[in-house]
Image: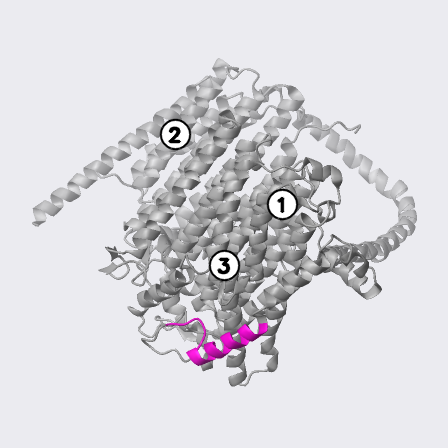
Amino acid sequence: MTTANILAIADQQQAVAAVLFYIFAGISAISALGVVISRNIVRTAVFLLFTLVGVAGLYFLLNAEFLAAVQLVVYAGGTLILIIFGVMLTSKSPFSRFEPKAVEVVIAISVASVIFFALVLAITRTKFAVNPTDFTAYPIDKLGQTLLGDFLVPFEIVSVLLLVVMIGAAYLAKGRRREAD
Amino acid sequence: MEIGLTHFLILAAFLFVCGIASIMLKRNAIGILMGVELILNAANVNLVAFNRFSYGTINGQPVLAGQVFAIFVIVLAAAEAAVALAIFLNFYNNFATIDVERAQNLKG
Amino acid sequence: MPTPALLLLIATLLPLASFTILLFIGKRMGTPLAGVLATLAIGGSFVCSMIALMVWLNPSGQYFDPSRQTMIEWGANKNPINLPYQWVPIGPGIQQDHPNFMDVGIYVDSLTIVMFSMITLVATLVHIFSIGYMREDPRFPRFFTYLGLFCFSMLGLVIGGTLLQLFIFWELVGLCSYLLIGFWYEKKSASNAAIKAFITNRVGDFGFLIGFGILFYHLGNVTLPKMWMLLGDAGFGHDITLASGVIFPAGLLTVMGVGLFFGAVGKSAQFPLHVWLPDAMEGPTPVSALIHAATMVAAGVYLVGRIFPILTPGAKLFVAITGVTTLTMAALIALAQTDIKKVLAYSTLSQLGYMILAMGLGSWIGGLFHLITHAFFKALLFLGSGSVIHAAHHEQELPQYGGLIRKIPVTGITFGVAVLAIAGFSIAGWGFSGFYSKDMILAHAGAFGYLAESSGKSSAYWLFFYLPTIIAYVTAFYMTRCWMLTFAGKPRNQHLYDHAREAPIMWAPLVALAVLSVIGGKYLGVSELLQSGIRESTQYCRAVVPKFDGFGTAWPAEATTTTEGAEPTAAASSDIMEKGHELMHHCVGWAWLVGIGLGVIIYWNGYSIAGPLTKFPPVNYVRIWLYRRMYFDELYFSVFVAIVMALSWLSATFDKYIIDGIVNGVGGLVKRTAFLAGWNDRYVVDGAVNGVATLSQELGAAVRAPQTGRIRMYVTVLMVAIGLGLAGAIIVTLSR
């Protein structure tokens, strides 16, 4: 294979990656905007779902396959279901609306644009270190080793935290018993 | 143009401000929760992108600290959602609404 | 995929299909139809197994062995079919630097084929029987749903090519057992028994997990033949150096073997985890026949058969001791039980003890041969007792029966055949199925005794021969007692006797099993097929490890005389086998006649002889001790409860005297100090405090205004502040 061929293939791969990035980024960004704009809480939840899926796609592009799977399973699959349950349990009609005041909208939009502008400015003006990962070995295997090696203590603490949260959530969410009994 | 770190960071920034706007605008408590989820996702994209592009290898070994942190964030987000929803359920039981404007018992 | 493997896979999946269908539309299909569907499915499995058996015996094919990268021939006396599949990559193990896999796979050798044939056959007959037995039950479709799941799990257990798979299906059959024991969950005793079975099995499975963990740490999850190849020298009892240079110490090997065996102890209800099996008789009787006699409880023996080559002498000794303890204890308890199903349950325990003992003594063929023959006659006994119970309107107590042969003759005769089979009936070297398998075990036990003697071991090793020999007499006696009390003599409950009636649909399974119980030992070629199973596995392993002799390493290892190329035998050299067989022949040749004769004489007319006999003090106490099952349940209950009670008493005392004492003392001290401090407080401190309080009040009023309690306002203020700050930063940045 000639050098030109190899370069052509590399170009092609880059082009594919760019297209994929813009697709996933577009999905996430537009859905995130939908989360903000939508007035209907169920629709908001669906937009959030699309955002999460788009972010999962971005993880794939970033060679974080396991994380993408976790994002889909835990986030899109678990957390979002939890939220939708919350919606169902707390609204008498699923289409209940609470409109914000116009002045609040103005404040929110201006604050958000200022922050966004500031962040973009910061991002574009900073020189970040360049030290890309070369994923040729077993990334998942390595991830497991990192998780249970260097990060063992945080891992255990998180597991304890989850237990605490589980008990706490169950306690908080349990129905009120009558005190007289 | 090659897709690099900047692209991901700008997308994350956008998700972040969307989350903030959600928190400021939603009167439904669960809407606020969704805003928080957006913010956490923005942070996660940042973590993974930085890990991929500017903190990738040490001594020839791939480093995955960013991904591990992202996993922790996902776990914490799940925990936070569970507790928040439990609180909302309690709130709903007490006030018969989910509108946060009605939660004013802490008013000084 | 080679034909037999494909057929067995279909046979495994058919019950799963029936389970899935019945799970969703079983209730709509209604009472006879659901049962018919399940029966057709398992019948299909049986047909598949039979075809597989035919193909296996006349092999004509080759398959590509992925682990060896060549084509090899499969079939009886040739090679097993070993098809591993790489499932989940789990990173490098301690001995490889390439990734390790959680393998799954299919492993088919003659043992697999034999087990398949036995399981599908007994399961089919039990299905047919159940259609009659469960007809009046409102949860009829659910019963067959569970049976389908059970058959799938059991067949999956047998076809599985790795220990991991074995464990998965192992748990599944445990679940089915739990569901089916507690099938009549309205009965408190049934649901308790189900829980007891489940918990007791967990204890055993914990041991299994420990053993599997040790194995996994050293080898990863490997296929059965690879495990044998790598650890085939375990029988010699020395450390094994793995290919990577890692040393697998002999002590750890023993711990691993004992741990794995503990799984079998739980599932096969061996001492000391035997307590669940008698209680499991609360389940419907067909379940007792299928799960708690013929198949699932035998899975423990099957497991020991599969891990046989990796057991060290120490582990085998442990296995043998467990077996001999169980078989003795259970047979004695069976003497005094009055519930017909409890008698059979303890008899099952005792027979399982024989199989485990055989395994421990190195008699691989003997144990598995007995497994097959026992499945036939014990399933027959249970189905017969089911027929009796059905006829007697769910009365299970022997004292209520008597003379039933005149009312339910088919049941009585087939039950009698089973009793003869289990007692080891034989004339002039020809006998019923139990005769051949039990003789093989006892002959090997005798050979083992000579072997131990010749290598200078303590004479206590002869117990492994003499206890089972004595129990062979006892077995014949208590089975005869059971039959006589049920079918012979005068009716002791006239009302029950008058209403007893047989259901014709139950005849076919009874007769079929009776025929099998008669011919199963000699004419079905079971032991020859098992022998060929050893040959296949050994041959397969020797292609890689030329000195492999895992199935020939009998205990004690130093006396093993098998050489390369020689036919692998279960025990050692042939002259010792000869001596063992002769000794066995002298000791138990007429055991069946003595036991049965004694039983017939004593129980000729119900309790008229046995009743007064057991009234006298020493006999009396022994009878009660045995009747109460040697007080094992009470022992376990009181020990565990006593520990808990003692601990709670200890903590209560600690609380009451030490903690409370400290707290009260501190309290008193504080009270005294407080009095002094009070005066000081009132006049000195209060003045200062009041001044501060007034100040705080003023400040608070000022700060109070923005505390609206509205969370969104807080967020907005926060964000506006940040936004303002950032806006400043932007201006500064851009203006530079």
Q: Quadrant of residue C206?
A: bottom right
- Residue type, label 1: Ala
Task: Tell me which chain the residue with mark 1 is part of.
Answer: C
Distance (Cα) linking label 1 and label 3: 32 Å
Task: Specify whether residue C584 is painted magenta.
Answer: yes
**Type of the residue with mark 3:** Ser
C-alpha separation, residue under disc 3 versus residue under disc 2: 69 Å
Q: Nearer the viewer, residue C590 or C136?
A: C590
Q: x%, y% of residue C227?
A: 39, 64
The image position of residue C128, as x and y in percent, is 50, 39
Relative to residue B3, is residue C445 depicted above or below?
below
Q: Quadrant of residue C161?
A: bottom left
Q: Is residue C261 left or right of residue C728?
A: right
Name the amino acid, label 2. Thr
The residue tagged 2 is A51
Q: Which residues are magenta?
A: C568-587
At mark 3, the secondary structure is helix
Judged left or right of residue C125, residue C389 is right
The residue that disc 1 covers is C194
Q: Are marks 3 and 2 in contact (CB under 8 Å)?
A: no
Foreground mark, 1 or 3?
3
**Can see residue C178?**
no
Q: CA distance from mark 2 to mark 1?
A: 48 Å
* Chain that bears disc 3: C
Q: Chain of mark 2?
A: A
Dot 1: element: helix
